[in-house]
Amino acid sequence: MTPELLASLAAMLLSLAASYLPRFSGWFNTLDGVFKRLLMLGLLAAISAAAYALTCAGLGSQLRLSLACDAPGALDLFKTFLAALLANQATYQIAAPKTKG
């Protein structure tokens, strides 16, 4: 499984949780549409930053992260982040319950 696929699947699960997980979806649905997108962007960016920080702290191999703590590794992480972001937003557009009205 590639890092992009794994990140995309995790991002899709996050989006589905925002749509259907009882307490989280109730809170999430009260937010403005722009803030919803920015929140997802921030969550995905925080997860990506944490993965890179763990790798640079020397814990990447112990956590089986296939990421290098260098410029090419950061570029790979950015590409993976973009794939996750696209999967997250597409999943929300497709799977979120639509309100009548």
Image: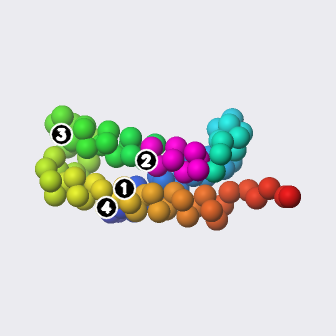
Q: Residue at x 26, y 48 (%)?
A: 65
Under tag 4, what secondary structure? helix
The magenta stretch spans which residues?
Answer: 34-42
Residue 56's disc is 3
Residue type at mark 3 is Cys
Residue 44's disc is 2
Under tag 3, what secondary structure? helix
Position of residue 23 measured from the top left corner of the image (x, y, whole percent)? 69, 35
Residue 6 visible (yes or no): no
Which residue is outermost to the right?
A: 101
Position of residue 9 measured from the top left corner of the image (x, y, whole percent)? 47, 57
Residue 97 lies in quadrant: bottom right
Classify mark 2: residues with Cα within 10 Å, few (<14), some (14-19) or many (20+).
Answer: many
- Left or right position of 35 against 87: right
Residue type at mark 1 is Phe
- According to the picture, the residue beneath numbered tag 1 turns out to be 81
Residue 79's disc is 4
Name which of mark 2 and mark 4 comes first in the sequence. Answer: 2
Q: Are marks 1 and 3 in contact (CB under 8 Å)?
A: no
